[in-house]
Image: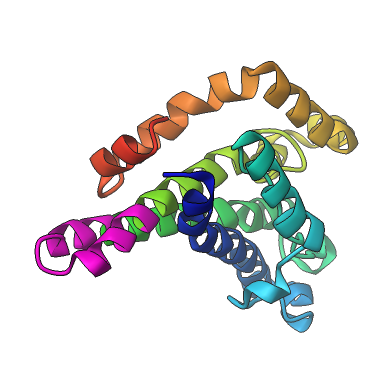
Amino acid sequence: MNKIQLLAVIALPVLFAITVHEAAHGWVASRLGDSTAKMLGRVTLNPFKHIDPIGTLIVPLATFLLTGFLFGWAKPVPVNERNLRNRRWDMALVAVAGPGANLLMAAIWGLAVQIGLALWGSFQWLALPLVYMGAAGVLINVILMVLNLFPLLPLDGGRVLNALMPPAMSARFSQLEPYGLILLVALLVTGLLSAILSPVISATIGIMPGAGVVRELFPV
């Protein structure tokens, strides 16, 4: 499979992974008392509401074509902590909603792989895209879930860890947020991030429907 074919296979799973992730943040926030995202039209599965021209289009396309590695982001869903009923714990719930949505989508894409395998003999024209796109959907959503749960602000895992800390420690931890993305890139460049996350990604894929096919098509 060349890069153009691979890009065609992963485009839809990537778009859904990012869109549903962000919409889940906004939906949970609205249920917990903050309607900011809802008023701005961000609690929606319409991908155009979540697309960041640079982070969702230009950067992923450039990094993929130049390096084969897909990296990008969507517009963050705005959340006003002051509107939440329990600011610390509710922020943790809002944060974990995104990775939770990715876990659910990974399972759904895994079922698509199994449906594709069942149809392989009679309807290969339909089975082929289901298997390849489903496998890509499992991989992409698991990677996005595990990466976002890494305990570093401003990632979702950092929000959850921040809520679990005593107030004094939480305040100090929050001061690291402006440097979070720099630390993340440093971990990525040195290979430490991959070393830390790869076993978790592999183990999570292992419990998904169609895991064997995912590993065969996209070894991790």
Is residue 125 located in the magenta-colored stretch of the structure?
Answer: yes
The residue lying at 52 percent from left, 41 percent from top is 143
Estimate the x, y position of residue 187 in percent, counting from the top left. 71, 22
Estimate the x, y position of residue 119 in percent, counting from the top left. 15, 65
Question: In the picture, residue 183 is in which quadrant?
Answer: top right
Estimate the x, y position of residue 206 in percent, counting from the top left. 30, 36
Judge whether 133 appears above or below 154 on screen: below
Left or right of 7: which side holds 51? right
Do we see residue 160 in this rendering?
no
Left or right of 6: which side holds 92? right
Judge whether 37 appears above or below 65 on screen: below
Q: Which residue is more in the foreground, 196 or 152?
A: 196
The residue lying at 81 percent from left, 34 percent from top is 180
Estimate the x, y position of residue 78 in percent, counting from the top left. 79, 65
In the rendered image, the quadrant that contains the N terminus is: top left
Q: Which residue is more in the foreground, 8 or 36?
A: 8
Question: In the picture, residue 68 is in which quadrant?
Answer: top right
The count of marks equals 0
Question: In the picture, residue 49 is in which quadrant?
Answer: bottom right
The residue lying at 71 percent from left, 52 percent from top is 73
User: Which stretch did the figure color magenta?
Assistant: 113-133
The residue lying at 59 percent from left, 65 percent from top is 24
Left or right of 138: which side holds 3? right
| Scheme by which the image is coloured | rainbow
Do we see residue 182 in this rendering?
yes
In the rendered image, the quadrant that contains the C terminus is: top left
Q: Which residue is more in the foreground, 15 or 172?
A: 15
Is residue 90 located in the magenta-colored stretch of the structure?
Answer: no
Main SS of the magenta part reads helix
